[in-house]
Image (spheres, helix red, strand yellow):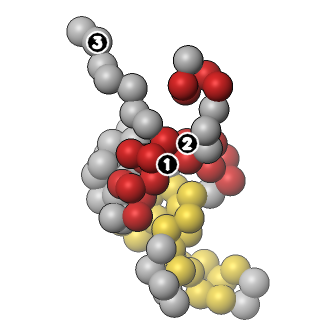
Amino acid sequence: MSRARQSVEDRRLRLLKGACPVHGNGMSQVNVLKVDGRIVNLVECDRRACPIQGIQEHSDGKIRLLPQYAGLLEQNELLSA
């Protein structure tokens, strides 16, 4: 069984909707953190085996992936090969 490759743009669009960029599942709050004097939510994919996490700002609601997952949203030679 072959799976279609996900484009970087598809992943970005999922994240903009508040969903995991890989699975499309919602991302739920798992903790509240203080970062640079701001209170933010730590969110993660609802899929049990998925480790993808991000920070959700209270001011704009956008989710920014943690640095170790940021590569999912960057154009990569291996992804486009």
Give the structural element (helix, strand or loop) at label 1.
loop
Whether residue 11 can be seen here:
yes
* Mark 1: few/some/many CA within 10 Å (<14, 14-19, 20+): many
- Foreground of the two, 59 or 80: 80
Residue 31 percent location from the top left of the image? 50, 72
| Residue at figure coordinates x 61%, y 22% from the top left | 78
Give the structural element (helix, strand or loop) at label 3.
loop
Residue beneath label 3, please?
2
Residue 4 percent location from the top left of the image? 32, 23
Return the residue found at the far top: 1
Residue beneath label 1, please?
52
| Residue at figure coordinates x 72%, y 90% from the top left | 37
Q: Is residue 8 left or right of residue 49?
A: right
Q: Tell me if label 2 and label 1 are in contact, CB under 8 Å.
A: yes
| Residue at figure coordinates x 56%, y 64% from the top left | 64
Residue beneath label 2, please?
72
* Mark 2: few/some/many CA within 10 Å (<14, 14-19, 20+): some
Residue 45 percent location from the top left of the image? 39, 53
Residue 73 percent location from the top left of the image? 56, 47
Q: Tell me if label 3 and label 2 are in contact, CB under 8 Å.
A: no
Amino acid beneath label 1: Ile
Q: Tell me if label 3 and label 1 are in contact, CB under 8 Å.
A: no
Q: CA distance from mark 2 to mark 1?
A: 10 Å
